[in-house]
Amino acid sequence: MLHLSKKVEYGLIALRHMAMKPFGQVFTAKELAKEYDVPYELLAKVLQKLARGGIVRSLQGVRGGYVLARKPKELSVSTIIRIIEEERPMVAECYSDGADSCYLFDNCTIRRPLGKLQRNLNVLFDRMTVQEII
């Protein structure tokens, strides 16, 4: 079933942490990794992706780190997932890998219900913002 990767989880944890503090406060990958006991290297890569995607800004220098680039209510969970993973999470392989990935595709009795579930999840992730996970 639907599974968010550790990268997405760590990204959302970091963004939630940033969103709970005053807007404009700077955070380092190292302090966030230590605070939540997550792998520093992986979190640093996730934050770099979020910076390239315009979700956070990377600040250089002695007091450098990461800062939210937009208000939490402007950051949809689906955008964050796509920036980190470059695709949406799917409930079934046939939706991510196509008809050729499943020998039952033409005769599958649950493909349409799963498609409805997938559409509902897409809407949920599109509407949900970082503000809502604070």
Image: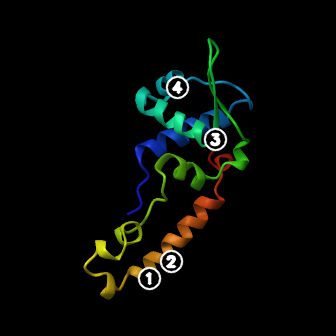
Report crowding for label 4: few under 14, some 14 to 19, many 20 or more residues within 10 A (C-alpha). many
- Residue at x 53% of width, y 66% of height: 121
- Disc 2 and disc 3: Cα gap in Å? 29 Å
Q: Is residue 71 left or right of residue 40?
A: right
Residue 29 position in % (x across, y down): 52, 26
For the residues labelled 2 and 1, the Cα–Cα distance comes to 6 Å
2 or 4: tag closer to the N-terminus: 4
The numbered disc on residue 112 is 1
Please name the residue shown 61% across and 39% down the image.
16
- Residue neighbourhood size for the residue with mark 3, other residues' Cα within 10 Å, grouped as few (<14), some (14–19), many (≥20): many
Tell me the SS state at disc 1: helix
Picture disc at residue 116: 2
Q: How far across and how far down the image is residue 87, in percent?
A: 48, 57
Report which quarter residue 89 is drawn in.
bottom left
Q: Amino acid at mark 4?
A: Ala
Instruction: Judge whether 39 appears above or below 13 on screen.
Output: above
Q: Quadrant of residue 53?
A: top right
Q: Amino acid at mark 3?
A: Ile
Q: Amino acid at mark 1?
A: Arg
* Crowding near the residue tagged with mark 1, few <14, some 14–19, many ≥20 C-alpha atoms within 10 Å: few
